[in-house]
Amino acid sequence: MENKSPEKKELQTNISGETITFTQKMETMSNDPKVKEGVVAFVRTILNVGISIADAAPGGVGEILDAVALIGKKIREKNKDKSQTGGFDLTPDVPAWVNVLANAGEIPTGGVFPSYAIPTVFQLSRDIPRMVEGFNQARSILKNEQVDYQVNKTQIDNAIEKFNPKK
């Protein structure tokens, strides 16, 4: 008789006959390049929007974040041949001159002009398709999860009942 450890669970088959668990789906999703690219684009968008909002306050933290983002971009461009060497780029699809030129609007407005919003919008135009594609890929990986639940609903409900009996 074979000893079954918790790591070697017996797998259930779904309607299409595939043997897959939720954990395997999560692992597949986390290793999928389209999903990864979509997640990176989403995080980059959140950071860029945050910097743009902060940049609207004159002489505030946004000015510093804008400068740090530009410096990180320049370091990343300089070290682009070395994949593991420093720098970060929150606007990889936007040339550095756009960031520099956008900052020219800060001078006549006394720092009120949210200059970082310009590269953010350009980057967002490239990141939206990446996010949509990543979301669609993740959804296609998980699409049978509802079907799996419906197939195993009785077993799942019985298990829940054992842990949470009705009074």
Image (tube, grey):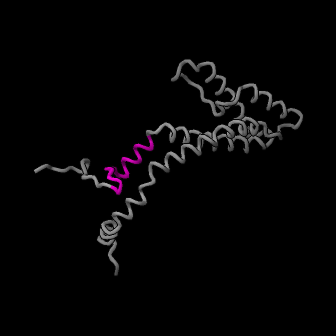
Q: Is 57 placed above or below 66 here? A: below
Identify which residue, 59 or 88, lies in the foreground: 88
Give the image location of residue 14, x and y in percent: 34, 56
Q: Residue furthest front?
A: 16
Give the residues drawn in magenta, as a range.
Answer: 14-30
| Total count of labels | 0
Image quadrant holding the C terminus, namely bottom left
Give the image location of residue 105, x and y in percent: 84, 34
Q: State the residue at coordinates (78%, 36%).
A: 115
The question of residue 36 being in magenta is answered with no
Identify which residue, 13 or 61, lies in the foreground: 13
Identify which residue, 109 or 152, lies in the foreground: 152
Q: Residue furthest bottom?
A: 167
Give the image location of residue 21, x and y in percent: 34, 51
As drawn, is 147 to the left or to the right of 69? Answer: left
As drawn, is 67 to the left or to the right of 132? Answer: right
Q: State the residue at coordinates (69%, 39%).
A: 125
Q: State the residue at coordinates (41%, 43%).
A: 28
Q: Is 37 placed above or below 9 here? A: above
Q: Residue furthest left?
A: 1
Give the image location of residue 90, x and y in percent: 64, 34
Q: State the residue at coordinates (73%, 45%).
A: 53
